[in-house]
Image: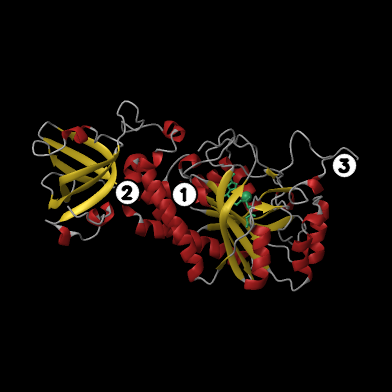
Amino acid sequence: MKSLKRTRVSELLKGDSSHLLGKQVNVKGWVRTRRGNKNVAFIALNDGSVIHSIQVVVDVASFNNNELLKKVTTGACISVTGVLVESVGKGQLYEIQAREIELYGDADPGRYPLQKKGHSFEFLREIAHLRPRTNTFGAILRIRHALSFAIHKYFNDNGFFYLHTPIITGSDCEGAGAMFRVTTLSFDDVPRKEDGSIDFSRDFFGKETNLTVSGQLEAELGAMALSNVYTFGPTFRAENSNTPRHLSEFWMIEPEMAFCDIDDNMNLAEDFLKYLVKYIMDNCEDDLEFLQKMYDNDLLKRLDFVLKNEFERITYTEAIEILEASGREFEFPVSWGVDLQSEHERYLVEQHFKKPVILTDYPKDIKAFYMKLNDDGKTVRALDVLFPKIGEIIGGSQREERYDKLSQRIKEMKINSGDVWWYLETRKFGTAPHSGFGLGFERLMLFITGMDNIRDVIPFPRTPMNAEF
Ligand code: 4AD
Ligand code: MG
């Protein structure tokens, strides 16, 4: 038989495939389940193109290769050629009556780990090489793709240029001191200077380098030429935070805009988040419905809620007053000057305002060096966007564009100005007011998918003591 071109399951089940009814089609994929009896076998075949599997019906008695059929079990990969017909059974419109099956790879039922439904998320993390084959992770990975696409589309449609910022850097954007070192020095024979300190001039780049914690500083350089830029890449933090919201390697989206103040910045953040949520609601209906049905009855309601509500905008100082007046016993007590914990952020969003909140004007001592100082001399033009279930989803600010103020902050915070001389130069040559923010991609994925743990919205999570796969 002449080999047929493969049709994706999405095309058969989601598109209008009525023109293929009664015709031969070929599908390839992985067996989700196989049931039936000695006369007929029903195979649910999934190729990842949609959440749904196509039903393949095999008339066992007339099928010519029963040895092969025995190996068509959960997890096996097969190619099926047969006739597309309307299904008499419940649950699907069409099914394939198999004429020919080719086995690419079997999956020993005694050893293939994804036998039953309802494995725990913990177990699935241990088999991250196979978990994309579950319905849940298929849905998550398709949503992750659509969300990445929507991010590029939004910026492209709004006059932003995608700027590729380096992953290896010699600077520390956030000043939190939690960076992964990049070196080719030998641990057995570390070159040292006379005073005993390590001689990084003999390292690969001739200086100390690390994996970037943020592309912001370089994005600012781009904005001082192209006006509106964004980055979208991996960022790395070596903080030992074992929480459901922290990864050691995560993806961040960082727009940076010239001629933009903190209000414009907040408007962009709100518009951008709403656009992304709406894009996924419009384009990933099946996957969202599946996740809602399986895990989270309120998922679509929560997404809709973000679209329908204007984000509440208040200052840090007002937030502290609300928290102090709440009468709540927080695990971390609040007073002006403390950094907010997720319990405080979630109280403001979920209990007090009952909608997303943007907090601005934080104390300068708990924020990074590059934020614009307010006239009070105590607070900076920072903004954090807080979401239900997640807490902080975006962190950003208007940047300090005044050379004197910026170099004073750099001194106060004991940052080595030799590491950021190029950053300072933009304030010397043609400086301009500008602003930007960073959106944690996996935090947004958590919100959109309703998952509880950030390890379950990235294909291969990196967390303390875990870099398998
Ligand atoms: O608030 P952060 O640290 O801000 C910056 O890095 C700025 N340079 C951004 C900018 O203004 N261009 O991080 C931004 C966002 C956070 O709001 C959070 O969503 C996410 O990045 N994030 C993490 N996501 C997962 N795991 C971690 N360890 C994260 N740390 C921050
Ligand atoms: Mg932050």
Residue under the image location 46 percent in, 44 percent down = 457
| Disc 2 secondary structure class | helix
Q: Which residue is mark 3?
A: 193
Q: Is residue 398 something one can see in this rendering?
A: no
Residue under the image location 59 percent in, 42 percent down = 248
Seen from the viewer's position, the closer of residues 453 and 377 is: 453
Is residue 174 left or right of 40 when viewed as pictured? right
Callout 3, which amino acid?
Lys
Callout 1, which amino acid?
Met
The answer to whether marks 3 and 2 mark residues whose Cβ atoms lie closer than 8 Å is no
Q: Which mark is residue 445?
A: 1
Label 3 to label 2: alpha-carbon separation: 61 Å
- Residue 98 in the image, given as x and y percentages of width and height: 16, 45
- Residue 451 in the image, given as x and y percentages of width and height: 43, 42
- Residue 133 in the image, given as x and y percentages of width and height: 36, 41
Residue under the image location 43 percent in, 31 percent down = 123
Seen from the viewer's position, the closer of residues 382 and 406 is: 406
Label 2 to label 1: alpha-carbon separation: 15 Å
